[in-house]
Image: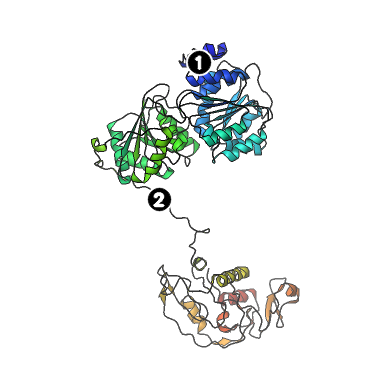
Amino acid sequence: MIFADLGLSDSLLKAVEKTGYTKPTPIQEKAIPVILEGGDVMAAAQTGTGKTAGFTLPLLQLLSGESNKKPDTMRALVLTPTRELAAQIQDSIETYGTHENLRSGVVFGGVNINPQKTMLRKGLDILVATPGRLLDLHQQKSVHFDKVDVLILDEADRMLDMGFIRDIRKVLALLPKKRQNLMFSATFSDEIRALAKTICHKPAEIDVAPRNSTVEIITQRLYQVEKQQKAQLLSAILRSNTSQTLVFSRTKHGANNLVKKLSKDGITAAAIHGNKSQAQRTKALDSFKQDLIQVLVATDIAARGIDIHQLESVINFDLPHVPEDYVHRIGRTGRAGATGLAISLVSSDERKQLRDIERLIKQAIPRADMSEFDLTPVAGGEEYQEETRPPRQPRGGRSAQGARGDAGQGRRRRSGQGGSAAQNPRGNGSPNGEAKRGSKQEAAGQDRAEAGRGRGRSSARAQGPQTKGPQTKSPQAKGPQGRENQSSGPRGQKSNTGQAQRNSRPSVARDENGDPNGNRMDYDNSYRNTTTYPSGNPPTRANHRSPGRGEGGAKSRPGAARSGGQRSGNSPRVESKSQLWQALRLKDRPSR
């Protein structure tokens, strides 16, 4: 059978002839006529058998003859799981639609959204998209689905799994009920088939090979190796064969570390994974396709549908957790009838994944002997170290135990009792270097009280006037960072010369605002003179002060809390602004 027997138009046959294909593949023979008749299709075929052309060619013929000019709409929607696959499908549409008067476009994340909005304003016939960016555009009212006649899910099993099904359901709810549904993939589990049938209307199920099978022309090989020797064995394999190789790693960190290891061994390599920007991913993939680098280390974003011409070998550095991904990984080689080699490096902790894969493909992967390779490290190379992600820190970047006590230098805690001894928050000889406080609830209450005061005021009230006697310095203890801390009274105070001089002055009963006669002293509205009020609050602020402010009931500042609301040192009556500021500087305030 030839393409002309499938009912394609002359313009499409001319475009196919330019690509060099003369005979359709089995999946194309069975799928194209059904799609041209307007029926729903669920097609499963092995990797590299031309599934993209199997839905692109009939789609172009169905849409030919008229063009959509309604802004922000499209007539056919193609959804893919990865950006690279979306760009590849767009290239196929442009290749086969050279002689068709149709407009097509592609949208995906990782790039500026504004050019995509501009493209959609002109109206499209075919839109290729990833679900996330498509929903972003719809949320911004830049795309509408009322004119969609055909929906295509490429790599349908991945689109309908737990990673994408929520977004797919949102898109399906926006589409017209009457439409043609096409689903293509290399693997279909029974669960995915059942879910797909709820989307399609009496679909024609097309299977051109045993389900979930691998291509027979791909030679599979397995090396059993210890995990610590995997990187060295991979380097030895790549050095023995200079052909281009696609290496699959399970994690993004592992892919980056492999690139560093291979580069040190003199092997040109690049990484492609989700943490890379779209520009970096495109550059790495283009460099690999243009034979500028020997090795492309990738996660499973490159396992779906990526077509790399004449790729000879694929290596699984780590086995995938999902068995179906193994079929898609090794399917990057052996495409379009070419031969390929698939190598898997399996350590003892991957035996379960290996059993699941062999059960899926219904065959045992042949074991090979790695004694033919020299595992001696390359001179000047570096050892591969599997990077482990550091443990997550609590929110705020501080440890859970004693975090509140480490907020700033010199910050101290009070126990809430006037005469009780407070512990240094840095810890004075405790086994874990943390302070011994009360319960977590009491510490949290003190934090909220101090934060509410704004100036570090304690929630404890003064216990009446007391006379402050000579202080006895407690032994100094060095905290975990080598700073000396000192505990005196209910709070541990930082030892410094200025504090010692202030503490040595004779104590005089004085209100917190500096009047030795017990009166409040505040600025008037001119900010130049001072006004002295009797004990209590100024009349204009009476309604905003907490009850009990005044004589004997005021909440004490941290400096006055050590002596029950009294203040050491003589303070003359302030009569000017400069004298007031000088008095405020002498007040004992906690350092930040």
Mark 2 residue type: Thr
Label number found at residue 207: none
1 and 2 marks in contact (CB < 8 Å): no
Left or right: 429 as drawn, with respect to 65: left
Pick the residue in front: 558 or 219. Answer: 219
* Residue 130 visible (yes or no): no
Q: Position of residue 88 (x, y in %)?
A: 50, 27
Three-letter code, disc 1: Val
Colour treatment of the image: rainbow
Q: Is residue 290 above or below residue 393?
A: above
Residue 16: assigned label: 1
The residue closer to the viewer here, 392 or 326, is 326
Helix, strand or loop at mark 1: helix
Point 59% across, 26% down: residue: 203
- Compared across the picture, whether 216 is left or right of 277 comes to left
- Give the secondary structure at mark 2: loop
**Residue 220 visible to an observer of this rendering:** yes
Q: Of 377 and 204, which appears nearest the observer?
A: 204
Expressed as whole percent of the image width and height from the top left, the position of residue 83 reads: 52, 34
Q: Earlier in the sequence, mark 1 or mark 2?
A: 1
Q: Quadrant of residue 114?
A: top right
> In this rendering, would 236 be left or right of 304?
left
- Image location (x, y in percent) of residue 61: 59, 17
Instruction: Name the residue rendered at 67%, 36% in the picture.
Output: 141
Disc 1 from disc 2: Cα separation: 49 Å
Q: Residues within 10 Å of mark 1 (few under 14, many from 20)?
A: some
Q: Position of residue 352 (x, y in %)?
A: 39, 43
Q: Which residue does the numbered mark 2 point to in the structure image?
A: 388
Q: Is the residue marked by circle 2 packed among few (<14), some (14-19), or many (20+) residues within 10 Å?
A: few
